[in-house]
Amino acid sequence: MKRDSHTDDEIRDILSLKNVVVIGMSKDDHKAAHYVPKYLSENGFNIIPVNPTTNNILGKKCYPSISDVEGDIDIVDVFRPSELVLPFVEESLKKNPKVIWLQEGIHNPDAEEIARKKGIRVVFNRCMLAEHQRLF
């Protein structure tokens, strides 16, 4: 699977943004959808979990959907299968994030194009944890 064409400087710029909504954040500490945002939280990011199956993850209020999140959103970090991404991206656009980040193994050209047309930067098939460790 290919990945986006952002340069290292562009990824560094994106990773300077700190309010991160995590769609599909998991309670299971063995899953990437748990340990990646946990790492980000421990490294200065404000993590906002979105998971309709629980009220709290890592001591943070968990929202049932991105529409329920209050305040500004810099990055929407998506941990959902590629074929399920489109509705989450469409809902995210209503919150005007600066970046949609599709985690490693996730790529949905239709969803990515919709976001780009709204002026939102799109990162796909990259892990935020791996990129942060590689660049900082």
Image (spheres, helix red, strand yellow):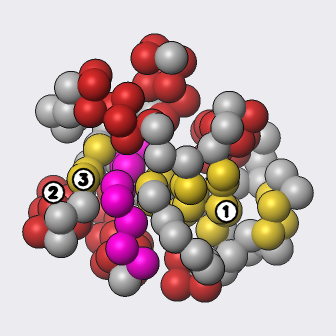
Amino acid on which the number 3 mark rests in the picture: Arg
Q: Position of residue 58 (x, y in %)?
A: 83, 52
Task: Tell me which numbered mark, 2 or 1, is placed earlier along the sequence.
Answer: 1
Q: Are marks 3 and 1 in contact (CB under 8 Å)?
A: no
Segment colored magenta: 95-105
Does residue 66 appear left or right of residue 99 in this picture?
right
Q: Residue at x 56, y 61 (%)?
A: 21
Image quarter hosting the N terminus: top left
Does residue 115 appear left or right of residue 127 in this picture?
left
Q: Residue at x 49, y 65 (%)?
A: 73
Q: Position of residue 114 (x, y in %)?
A: 17, 70
Badge 1 crowding class, 10 Å Cα cut-off, few under 14, some 14 to 19, many 20 or more, is: many
The residue at which mark 3 appears reads as 121
The residue at which mark 2 appears reads as 109
Give the SS element for disc 1: strand
Quadrant housing residue 91: bottom left
Give the SS element for disc 2: helix
Task: Tell me which numbered mark, 3 or 1, is placed earlier along the sequence.
Answer: 1
Q: Residue at x 55, y 55 (%)?
A: 20
The residue at which mark 1 appears reads as 49
Does residue 37 appear left or right of residue 121 in this picture?
right
Taking the magenta stretch, the answer to whether it contains residue 100 is: yes
Amino acid on which the number 2 mark rests in the picture: Pro
Q: Position of residue 117 (x, y in %)?
A: 11, 69
